[in-house]
Image (cartoon, helix red, strand yellow):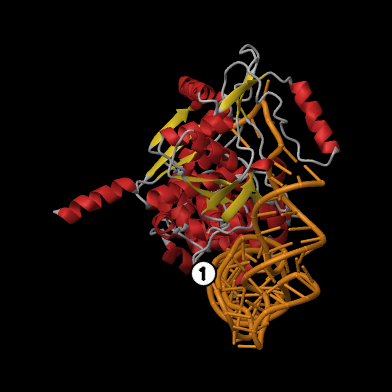
Amino acid sequence: MLPFVSLKIKQINIMVVTRFPPSPTGDLHIGGARTALYSWLYARQNNGKFILRIEDTDLERNSQKSIDAILDGMNWLGLDYDEGPVFQTDRFDRYKEVIQQLLDEGKAYRCDCSPEELEAVREQQRANKEKPKYNGKCRHRTDVPVEGSVVRFKNPLEGDVVIHDLVKGDIVINNRELDDLILARPNGVPTYNLTVVVDDIDMGMTHVIRGDDHINNTPRQINLFEALGAKLPAFAHVPMILGDDGKRLSKRHGAVGVMQYRDDGFIPQALLNYLLRLGWSHEDQEIFSREEMINLFKIENVNVAPSTFNTKKLIWVNEQYIQTLPAAEIAEHLQWHLENQNLDISNGPAITDVIEAHRERAKTLKELAENIRYYYQDFEEFDANATKKHFKTATPGILQNLLDKFSAVDDWNTESIDAVIKDTCEELELGMGKVGPALRVAVTGVAMSPSLDVTINLIGKKRTLERMEKAVAFATAKYAD
RNA sequence: GUCCCCAUCGUCUAGCGGUUAGGACACCGCCCUUUCACGGCGGUAACCGGGGUUCAAGUCCCCGUGGGGACGCCA
């Protein structure tokens, strides 16, 4: 009896809560997706709670489009959340309450320094080779009007703030490096550092996993936590992802929006796999199933150094998934691309059979969709380079020989097709190399495809015969003069 | 400029005082082969520099150098 009770209490105490808090000012990008993944993984492996929180306190820059893009991205990646999306704009009353509390307790104060005045101070500090920060002019004033003034936090003046970071170890920052940050704008709208802390407290956050560009905000937030008498969450700052020029990944490096990777033909699980391995490893393993990710991921093993995004490796991971996932699952992911490329697959072979035949030669789903068009749709003309290379003077004769034999086949399958090709080779005393390429161009219109028996079997007898007739005519005309 | 973080093949990484410095991507050969691929085999390639500590340093410490981040009434 007793052990059961204490176990239950222990479980309540260690209930892990993590979150992903994007601001809706753009797409869900690669860097955000990775921190979201890490937070999600950590919550899942601890049977904890993962919260999606939309940090939309910048009323000027928010957009519904960005909110949709973020939600779409999370959904596409399969990063499901247990709570949310929670919008900070719905919680303004709560923030105001906390700000008032800090004001009442003398832990915050009003300041009416103008933006111009502030900029002049910073300018001066920069000229003196100092770190630009608020000079505390209003910190002790009691005559600042409410109207038109901001609320600032009374940051401690002395002493060190220590971050016990799960990834980076202890980080020490002296309060002299910090200044009195603004908690609320003149119109009462709260700012980032305040809302984050209030939300993390209210939501019972146990682990804050975020990009290390936030390291500078963390000591300020720790001071706020303490001013509010709240227990600190654990912090884990993961390094940034860099572009191939060594700079922080941004739009100029090409695709950074997660949905762009969908459009480019990546499987979400492959993207996640790549992102997981970028800055983290488990022995020599490269491919991780969803379950393995959850079980094996250790936040402590995340690298401290920033890593460079490498599209070629991502493509390789994607290939691995295309090669090994069940064909039916590939088919689901392929659906979007088929529609996007206007390819109707109702009039042709089973898509799973086509996927089996082509999965080893496509790097992306987009490419896969492009490569399988000839099973479902007739082509207007033969690829010029292909006919130039493979249609010789003997071609009409060879193709006619094959055509006659194919016409006589009743049981259309890879064995019978293979037999026809071999018969023709023998009869004409030609090697496979003289027959195969021309036949391939004749039935597919292009120079590459899976092995001929498989390809021709999938194309079907009717289409094969029609295309070969057309090819014979084309080749004959080509060598007419 | 100030503060913070970081530093092993081109890239992602293993290494946690004693290793022929391992794996993966990319690249280059060879094999397989009717095309394109897959696959198999092999190869090129790294501890930023300088000082310490130690019998012993890629591993620990310090200083440089280089890179990244932050310094908003953005988040």
Does residue A349 show up? no
Place of residue A57 in the rendered image (x, y in percent of width and height, measured from the top left)? 56, 25
Give coordinates of residue A452: x percent, y percent.
53, 62
- The residue lying at 35 percent from left, 46 percent from top is A15
Q: Residues within 10 Å of mark 1 (few under 14, many from 20)?
A: few
Label 1 residue SS: loop
Q: Residue furthest right?
A: A127
Q: Nearer the viewer, residue A387 or A328?
A: A328
Question: Is A181 located above or below residue A384 in the figure?
Answer: above
The answer to whether residue A43 is above or below residue A287 is above
Q: Amino acid at mark 1?
A: Asp
Chain on which label 1 sits: A
The residue that mark 1 highlights is A284
Locate residue A54, reporting x and y percent.
51, 31
Quadrant where the C terminus of chain A is found in the figure: bottom right
Q: Is residue A182 left or right of residue B63?
A: left
Q: Is residue A385 above or below residue A224?
A: below
Residue at position x 13%, y 54% in the image: A1
**A478 or A189, which lies in front?**
A189
- Taking the spot 79% from the left edge, 29% from the top edge, the residue there is A121
Number of callouts: 1
Residue A112 left/right relative to A130:
left
